[in-house]
Amino acid sequence: MPYEDLKREIVDAFVYLEEHGLNWAYSGNISVKVGEDLFLLSPSGVWKARMKPEDVLLVTGDGKVLEGNGKPSVEFKTHVAIYRARRDVKAVVHAHPIYAGIIAAKRVDIDPVLEELTFYVGGTIRVASYAPSGTEELARNAVEALGDKKAVILANHGVVACGSSLEEALAVLGYVERAAKVAVYSMLIGGVQPLPREAQTLERELYVQKLQKALFK
């Protein structure tokens, strides 16, 4: 079966997400870029942690299914918009963790409350302006709020994390949820104190260096 290993990775990723409370049931979607305007994509309408590798679709950028019998998620428009805006991105994970969901409902950006947020994710994680799921507007809003970071929160929705591999995208999602949890609890005890600006600048420079290297892999 073509791309068998990558399909298995996508299936295993959903099991991991559900086991760690980062996604649930029919929610979420994952894509991996496998060629120019060619992607592996989780199907819509299935319990994600119960998928099999053969359920994973092979689709073009316009959503045409080349392999598989399922239906592409409407959220695929956001995935494609990110791939087209960011040459460094090879995998996108859209999930619905609890604490990041609170941030999405509150519609407040997550400042660099932990060093790792800048070093691994790029700094402040912005909440994209609200737009209905599956729309071109949501895709545009997500790309704009993402910038050169590796994650964006969708207002009243979930998190989109990306990386140069599926493994990295999953790690980014974990960093965002950890930072969201710290931010939520910090709000409860009086507010958030982000990293000193000097530390943010240093971590940001290191992040940009890594990003530039990824472009030439």
Image (cartoon, grey):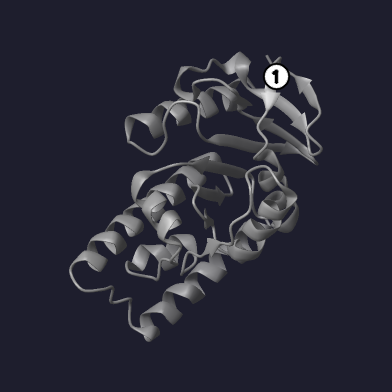
Q: In this view, does 157 lie above or below 53?
A: below
Q: Nearer the viewer, residue 186 or 129?
A: 129
Position of residue 171 measured from the top left corner of the image (x, y, whole percent): 43, 47
Which residue is at a point 49% across and 21% down the rendered structure image? Answer: 47
Q: In this view, does 129 lie to the left or right of 1?
A: left
Q: Residue at position x 35%, y 45% from top?
A: 98
Residue that mark 1 sits on: 2
Looking at the rendering, which quadrant does residue 36 occupy? top right
- Is 136 positioned to the left or the right of 131 in the image? right
Q: Does 120 appear above or below 162?
A: below
Q: Can residue 165 be seen? A: yes
The residue that appears at 47% across and 64% down in the rendered structure is 125
Check disc 1: other Cα within 10 Å, few if <14, some if 14-19, many if 20+. few
Q: Residue furthest left?
A: 189
> Element type at marker 1?
loop
> Residue 62 appears at what percent x and percent y?
81, 37
Which quarter of the picture shows residue 148?
bottom right
- Residue 120 pos. (x, y %): 45, 60
